[in-house]
Image (cartoon, rainbow, N blue to C red):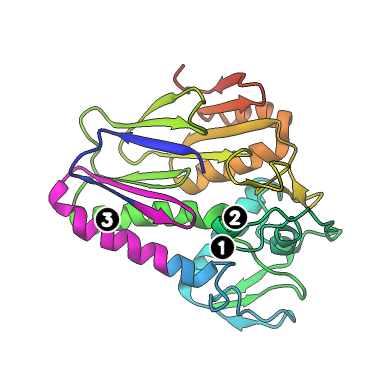
């Protein structure tokens, strides 16, 4: 995932490996750090138990594949609702029903264990399966033969929820970064949350300052890659294969990390068409082209 560095790094900071990326936690009150970390670990543990594709005992992997209605936990219900809203927001560019396509592309285990297998062909259904998902209270109906992959929104949701829960439990300002997904809550430092955004170590650095409650997401076509760099984890739902890498990375600042991540993921899928779309939304965005040509939109700082 993109390299996201918060400054300064001091006694109010902790980081650890999570989901084949780095989780980073920063609090304005260093004394709150131990409790804050437990809160983040508890939220991420619950999210993993609900929707990890790489745990056979996760709730999402134990859903029946025959299209029958199934009671689900409040956590999974909320994660599915979030994913469907992202699909609606992007006209299906962020699609939570691409697990089979992701497996066919070779991303069928935790990224740290991923080999270099070739991309296999996956034919998408004429009608997107996400339009046929049904959630009635705590009862979820997934179309027969469909497997969910909530990765595009679940990690961002976990960042948002973790930040909110830390601020509530500890009464401190907090920044939670889960790979390329950053959420903040509570009071910010006097000079705001200072973040350096870049993808690879050799890439140009983009400094950003987030106000209290701000969020930022970065989606990349050059970080989670396999098959000798020909495949990445952001699929085009219309083809079922990795989106054309028009952009190396796309970063968006928004009010929530879920919103920011929804826009960055869809922008990668849309390629050049992302430019007029993001302009119409008026969001601060930074798009890094294949030749390191930077396009800044909205109020993204230059």
Task: Name the element at disc 1.
Answer: helix
Residue that badge 3 annotates = 166
User: Residue at 48% of width from left, 51% of height from top?
Assistant: 156
User: Residue at 56% of width from left, 62% of height from top?
Assistant: 81
Task: State yes or no: residue 106 in magenta.
Answer: no
Task: Name the element at disc 2.
Answer: helix
Earlier residue among tags 3 and 1:
1
User: Residue at 73% of width from left, 79% of height from top?
Assistant: 67
Q: Vertical placement of 93 versus 139: above or below? A: above
Range of residues picked out in magenta? 16-45
With 208 as the anchor, is 294 left or right in this view? right
Whether label 2 touches label 1, CB < 8 Å: yes
The location of residue 110, given as percent across then percent down, is 57, 61
**Cα distance in 3D space between marks 2 and 1:** 6 Å
Q: Which mark is residue 85?
A: 2
Q: Vertical placement of 99 versus 138: above or below? A: above
**Cα distance in 3D space between marks 3 and 2:** 25 Å
Task: State yes or no: residue 37 in magenta.
Answer: yes
User: Residue at 68% of width from left, 68% of height from top?
Assistant: 133
Query: In this orientation, which residue lies closer to the viewer: 145 or 298?
Result: 145
Residue that badge 1 annotates = 81
With 194 as the anchor, is 284 left or right in this view? right
């Amino acid at each position: 995932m993109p390299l996201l560095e918060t400054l300064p790094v001091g006694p109010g900071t902790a980081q650890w490996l999570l989901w084949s990326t780095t989780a980073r936690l920063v609090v304005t009150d260093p004394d709150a750090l131990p409790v804050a970390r437990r809160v983040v670990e508890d939220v991420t543990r619950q999210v993993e138990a609900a929707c990890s594709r790489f745990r056979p005992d996760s709730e999402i992997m134990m859903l029946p594949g025959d299209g029958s209605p199934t009671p689900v936990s409040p956590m999974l219900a909320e994660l599915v609702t979030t994913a469907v809203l992202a699909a609606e927001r992007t006209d299906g560019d962020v699609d939570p029903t691409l697990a089979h396509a992701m497996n066919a592309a070779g991303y069928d285990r935790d990224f740290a264990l991923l080999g270099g297998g070739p991309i296999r062909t996956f034919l998408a259904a004429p009608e997107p399966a996400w339009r046929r998902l049904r959630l009635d209270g705590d009862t979820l109906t997934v179309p027969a033969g469909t497997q969910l992959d909530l990765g595009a929104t679940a990690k961002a949701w976990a960042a948002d929820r973790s930040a909110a829960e830390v601020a509530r439990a500890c009464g401190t300002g907090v920044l939670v970064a889960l790979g390329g997904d950053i959420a903040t809550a509570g009071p910010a430092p006097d000079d705001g949350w200072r973040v350096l955004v870049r993808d690879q170590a050799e890439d140009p650095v983009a400094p950003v300052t987030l106000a209290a409650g701000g969020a930022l997401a970065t989606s990349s076509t050059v970080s989670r890659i396999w098959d000798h760099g020909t495949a990445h984890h952001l699929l085009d739902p219309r083809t079922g294969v990795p989106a054309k890498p028009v952009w190396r990375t796309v970063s968006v600042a928004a009010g929530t990390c879920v919103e920011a991540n929804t826009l960055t993921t869809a922008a990668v899928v849309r390629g050049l068409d992302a430019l007029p779309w993001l302009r119409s939304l008026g969001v601060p965005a930074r798009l890094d082209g294949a030749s390191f040509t930077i396009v800044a939109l909205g109020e993204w700082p230059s």
